[in-house]
Amino acid sequence: MLVYSNNFSGFKTWRQFASYVGIAPFEYESGSSIKRGKKVSSLSNKRIKGLLSSAVATSIQHNPEMRVYYQKRVQEGKNKNLVKNIISNKVVSRVFAVVKRGTPYVNLTNYAA
């Protein structure tokens, strides 16, 4: 992420980076056709998207918070790939937050009652 984001200075927000990577959802409309669901862009950086996909799989496997979130959303009937895309957005937002603040990541679930 350091290289592709130019040391996190090439993008102002994590959402811009998510759009560059191809994990940000966009409305799908075509002229007067019926409005469809949101889709991700096919114009993306496939290499970093693949690396994020691996990070998401590891996160679901080893991070209890992400595992619970993934299982809950899948049980609600959500598409597995949609949930993985949401988790990849969470990972990107957390990485950008840690770098922009200059502080280590604090897992708040350790402090929840």
Image (cartoon, helix red, strand yellow):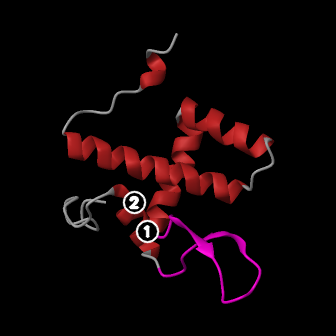
* Left or right, 44 with reference to 39: left
> Where 71 sits versus 37, above or below?
above
Q: Which residue is mark 1?
A: 19
What span is in magenta?
22-43
Say which quarter of the image contains residue 111: top left
Percent from the top left, x then y, of residue 73? Answer: 71, 43
Mark 2 falls on what kind of element? helix
Mark 1 falls on what kind of element? helix
Q: In percent of the image, x 64 and y 51: which residue is there?
A: 83
Percent from the top left, x then y, of residue 67? Answer: 62, 36
> Where 112 sits versus 105, above or below?
above
Extreme-bottom residue of the structure: 31
Q: In percent of the image, x 54 and y 36: which residue is there?
A: 62
Q: CA distance from mark 2 to mark 1?
A: 6 Å
Q: Which residue is mark 2?
A: 15
The kind of residue tagged 1 is Ser
